[in-house]
Image (spheres, rainbow, N blue to C red):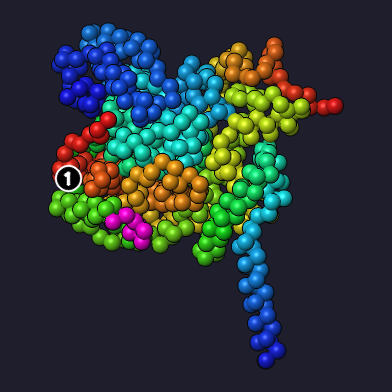
Amino acid sequence: MRLAAEASYVVRIWIFLENIRRKVLKIQKDEVTHVAHLARLEFTEAETEKFTAQLNNILIYMDMLNRADTTGVEPMTHAIAQKNAFREDLVKESLSREATLANAPDARGDFFRVPKVIE
Amino acid sequence: MELNQLTIHELQEKIKAGETTSTEIVQAVFRRIDAVEKDVHAYILLTREMALEGAARADEEIKKGNIKTLTGIPIALKDLLCTKGVTTTCASHILHNYVPPYDATVVEKLRDAGAVFTGKTNMDEFAMGSSTETSYFGITKNPWDLERIPGGSSGGSAAAVVADECIAAIGSDTGGSIRQPAALCGVVGMKPTYGRVSRYGLVAFASSLDQIGPFTKDVEDCAIMMNILAGYDPRESTSVPADVPDYRQFLSRGIGGWKVGIPKEYFIEGIDAEVKDAIQQTIKVIEGMGAKCIEVSLPHTEYCLAVYYIIAPAEASSNLARYDGVKYGFRSLDGRDLMEMYKKSRSAGFGAEVKRRIMLGTYVLSSGYYDAYYKKASQVRALIKQDFDEAFKQCDVLLTPTTPTPAFKIGEKTDDPLQMYLSDIFTISTNLAGIPGMVVPCGFTRAGLPVGVQFLAGHFEEGKLIQIAAAYEKNANLGKRRPKL
C-alpha cells in the first residue's frame, strides 16, 4: 500500500514537472522552423525567437480546451449542414486565358513562368 | 444637414421627390472625403471618377423614372471584395496590385440595385485583426477619437460610415469583424447567418466562418441592404437556398411579449464599467417595451476564443496557400529556384499577424497535432452551437455586450496577440455557431466613445434581429451625435 502511494506520489511530481516543462515550451524553435517550411515561409533568427515565444503563449492558452468533455461529440465542420451542391453539367463561359494571365508576375505565351524547378 | 449625412431611405425620398440628384450626393460624399480622409484614412482606394460616372448614369435612370432600391446611392466596399477592373488588395503587400477579372456576387447585386461605389475601404490584412492596424496601407483612425482604433477588421468601412464618407458600406465578419468595429464606431452592423449571403468573390480567410454584411447609419438602412445582399447563389457551394423575407416588414412590429435572453457568461470580470452600464440601460429600455429579459446560460462560452484561434488559422493557412507568387500578386525576385521563390515571396508579401496565423494554422493541422487541436476544437465547436440551440428554445433573441471595452488606443495591443484576440471575446461564438448577429449603438462613455449592444438570433432569423434593433432604436433616444472631425 505504502509503496503504491509513494509511487503515485512520484508519478504526480513527474507529471507536475512535465507540465512545467511543456508549459515553458509547447513548441521549440526547430519545430517553428519546420512548420515555417511546411507553410513556405522563412524567418530570421530574431523572428523565429519571437514567433516561438508568441506561439507558445497561444498554445498554452489553447490547453484550456482539455477541460471540455467531448466524449462522443461529432466534430463540427460547417455551421449549416448541407449536402453536395450539385449543378447541371453544362459547358459555360469561363475566364479567358488573357484575363487569367493578366495578373501573373511573369507570363509568356499561354503559360505562367516560374524559376526553374529541376536541375 | 449635408446630403452625405443622410441615410439611404432619406436620400431615396429626396431622389424620388426630385429634390436632389445622385451627382449631388456623390459630390457631397467626396467633399467630405476631401475634408476628413487625411485624418481618418478609411479608404485604401477612392474611385471618384467611376463614382461620378455612375452617378451621371443613375441620374439618367432617375429622369426616366427608373428608380431602384439603391439608385444613385454611394456605397463603400471593404477591400477584400473582388471588383472587376479595380484593385482588390486585402490590405496586403502580397495582393497590392491584384486586379480581379470578375465581380463578387454582392458587388454585382449592389450594382444591379443601382449603387454607386466610392472606393475600397481599409481593413486588417486579410481581415486578420481587431483594430485595422495590420493593414499594409496604414492605420485607420476612429472618427470619435483619432488616437484610437476604429475596431477591425472592417475598420475602414465602419469609420467611413460614421464619418459620413459614404452612405453605407460592406464589410465581412469572421469572428466579429463587422460587429466589433460597428460597436466601436457607433454604427449599425449585421453579420448574417452563414450561407445567407454569397461569399463568391470574397477573398477567403476562414471559409467556415466568413460572412459578408452591411454597415449602415440606422436599422432601416440595414434592412434595405439585407434585402439586396441576402439570397442563394449557385456559384457559392455553401450558399443556402432558403427564402429571403422582405426585411423591412420587421421594422415596425415591436417586441411585446418577447423573451430576450441575457447570457450570464457574457458579463465577465474585466468588462469596462461604462460598457456594462450602457448594456444594463439597454436591458431596461428593452423591458420597458414589453419584452421580458431572462437569464440564460451558454456554458461553453469560455472555450470560444481557443476554438476560434485554432479553426480560423487552420482554415486560413489552407486558404492562403494560394499566394505563391505565380498566379497574381507580389513575387520576390530573390529566389533562385521555385521553393525559394515561394518562401521569399510569401515571407516578404505577408505581414506579421498573417504569418503568425498561417504558422499557428499549419502547426495545428500538422501530423501529430491534428487530433489534439483541430479535432478537439471542432468537437467543442459543436458544443458551442448546442449551447445556442438550447438558449433559443427559451428565448427569441439574445442580448449581449459587443466588446469588453470601448475603442482602445492605437498601438495599445499590437505587441500582445492574445490581448488583441480578447477584444473579440463576445463576437466569436456567433461565427462558430453560424448564427446571425447585429450591433446597434446603445450609448456613449463619458469620454464620448460609442458603445454597441449585440443581438443574436437563431439561424436565418435576421428578421428578428431587425425587429428588436428597430424597436430599440426608436425607444433608446440616443439623439444624433456626430464625431467632431
| Residue B73, visible in the rendered structure | no
Main SS, magenta region, reads loop
| Residue density around tag 1, few if under 14, some if 14–19, many if 20 or more, within 10 Å | some
Q: Which residues are magenta?
A: B266-273
Magenta region includes residue B19: no
Q: For this rendering, which residue is in front, B436 or B475?
A: B475
Residue under the point 62% across and 17% down:
A101
Q: For this rendering, which residue is in front, B355 or A98?
A: B355
| Residue A99, visible in the rendered structure | yes
Residue under the point 62% across and 67% down:
A20
- Looking at the image, residue B415 lies above or below residue B47: below
Q: Position of residue B29 (x, y in %)?
A: 29, 20
- Looking at the image, residue A96 lies above or below residue B236: above
| Furthest residue in direction bottom, as rendered | A1
Q: For this rendering, which residue is in front, A70 or B131?
A: B131
Magenta region includes residue B272: yes
Where does the N terminus of chain B fall, quadrant-wise? top left
